[in-house]
Image: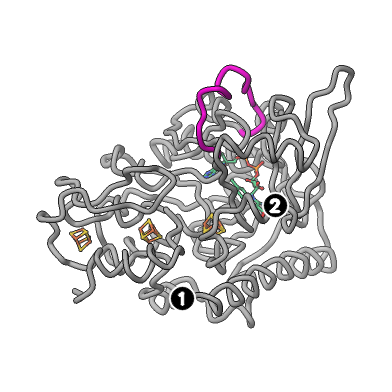
Amino acid sequence: MSSKTFEDLIKEVHERGICQECGGCVSFCSSAEYDVIGFKDAYKPPVYINKDKCLECGICYYICPQTHILDNELNKTYQFSDFSLMPIGHYDNIFSCQATDPEFLKYGTDGGVVNSIINYLIENKLVDGAIVSKTDAPFSKEATFADSKYDLLKASGAKLDITPQLDEIQKFCTYTHSIPELNHYKFKKLAVVGTPCQLYTIRCMQDLGVTPSENVEICLGLFCYENFFFEKFQVSKFEKDFNIKFSDIIKINIKEDVIFKLKTEVPPEKVIHIPFNQLKSYMRPACNACNDFTNIYADISFGGLGSQEKYTTVITRTKKGKEIFSKAVDAEVITCKNLDQDKKSKMVELISQYSISKLARKEKFMKNLT
Ligand SMILES: Cc1cc2nc3c(=O)[nH]c(=O)nc-3n(C[C@H](O)[C@H](O)[C@H](O)COP(=O)(O)OP(=O)(O)OC[C@H]3O[C@@H](n4cnc5c(N)ncnc54)[C@H](O)[C@@H]3O)c2cc1C
Ligand code: SF4
Ligand code: SF4
Ligand code: SF4
């Protein structure tokens, strides 16, 4: 297929500091059963483990979000042309929605819409389950499989029971290694929730028709301006910089900036907004090299930006995404705000500004890269 191999990914992606650690190359390696490549450290790019078993097929190179080999094919499938022409990607419609189930709403990151839709898909046997992410502590997430409302609520972003785990955690990261989880559920029909870099690699595999990407029934994409990473020794600096005690954090939400909800002795909880540019030293470096904010290849994209508190902005994109969204609305699993065209245009404009800003950040970063 290609004269390029994982060796080239090391040179062109890892050594340039732009590996997004999405895990696509590891999960979809043609020789994955022999552990040719893998993560030795979850917070560093993957490495060769059994190099002699490498088939030199080039799949890993093709599907890496940082080589952009399949961009043209994906753009054709998902009707995308260029960020300057369509900053939020091709879309069918935009909404502001909320879960009707009080628990999904209460524990949801924004309007609890993503988990409500997944729960609808599971209950109606449209999928067997979903790869989601549970929050173990502030800035600490882990991929997990959910096939019930109980699992989804357990993985819900707002439920931080942090104190016992804090001492055990050495590295803090808001990024989740969701893609490698796919290999554990090879015979299941799955919904996957992911950031743009994660869904990109799934879409490449679907384009190439490589197992187990056919199991992914629906891609639910989150907006993503950036993710954060820091080591334990940096926690005290973070606490000092922002006057936030880690053990007081009950919720982190990434929206127009990063929003911290902190417990207080007397309610209500304290809310602190920190702009992205003040968090630069905690940002995952490879996020600088990423251009997609709204998850342009997802079936449906979700974010907080553009909607009021406790509502989720929903962008329907593909035919499948549109159908599933309509079914969830008809089943009254979620409700949509009644927005006129002017309000929708304003939402698109705001989200476009973030998309353009992310693109500009990438262009600046890449110019300085050797
Ligand atoms: C790392 C990250 C960065 C984001 N950045 C932005 C941003 O810049 N601007 C913006 O408007 N919105 C951003 N979002 C999206 C936003 O925070 C909400 O996830 C989205 O609005 C959906 O809210 P909800 O209440 O409908 O979802 P919920 O019903 O609460 O469901 C959220 C789902 O996402 C899953 N999940 C949580 N974290 C991850 C993760 N790291 N990887 C994969 N799945 C995960 C959960 O398990 C759950 O299934 C980001 C989300 C994440 C996780
Ligand atoms: S076997 Fe193919 S996919 Fe796996 S590391 Fe080698 S070149 Fe990459
Ligand atoms: S596929 Fe993902 S993990 Fe692998 S090299 Fe590319 S960005 Fe890194
Ligand atoms: S900004 Fe988000 S989508 Fe881009 S590399 Fe970072 S985590 Fe992935």
> Residue 279 has which mark?
2
Helix, strand or loop at mark 1? helix
Q: Relative to 25, is 62 above or below?
A: below
Tag in front: 2 or 1: 2
Q: Nearer the viewer, residue 119 or 309?
A: 309
Q: Is mark 1 within 8 Å of ligand 4?
A: no
Q: Quadrant of residue 309?
A: top right
Give the percent coordinates (x, y) of residue 264: 84, 22
Q: Is residue 61 visible?
A: yes
Give the percent coordinates (x, y) of residue 111: 71, 41
Say few, some or many: other residues with alpha carbon within 10 Å of mark 2 (under 14 / 14 to 19 / 20 or more): some
Q: Relative to 228, is 66 above or below?
A: below
What's under tag 1, amino acid-wise? Asn
What's under tag 2, amino acid-wise? Leu
Most prominent secondary structure in the magenta stretch? loop
Please check the rendered image and state whether residue 72 is part of the magenta-colored stretch, yes or no: no
- Residue appearing at x 46%, y 77% in the figure: 370
The tag earlier along the polypeptide, 2 or 1, is 1
Relative placement, left or right, of 250 versus 36 is right
Cα distance in 3D space between marks 2 and 1: 32 Å
Helix, strand or loop at mark 2? helix
Which residue position holds label 1? Answer: 75
Tell me, what colour scheme is on the image?
one colour
Q: Is mark 2 within 8 Å of ligand 1?
A: no
Q: Is residue 99 visible?
A: no
Give the percent coordinates (x, y) of residue 7: 24, 66
- Residue appearing at x 41%, y 40% in the figure: 127
Magenta segment range? 157-172
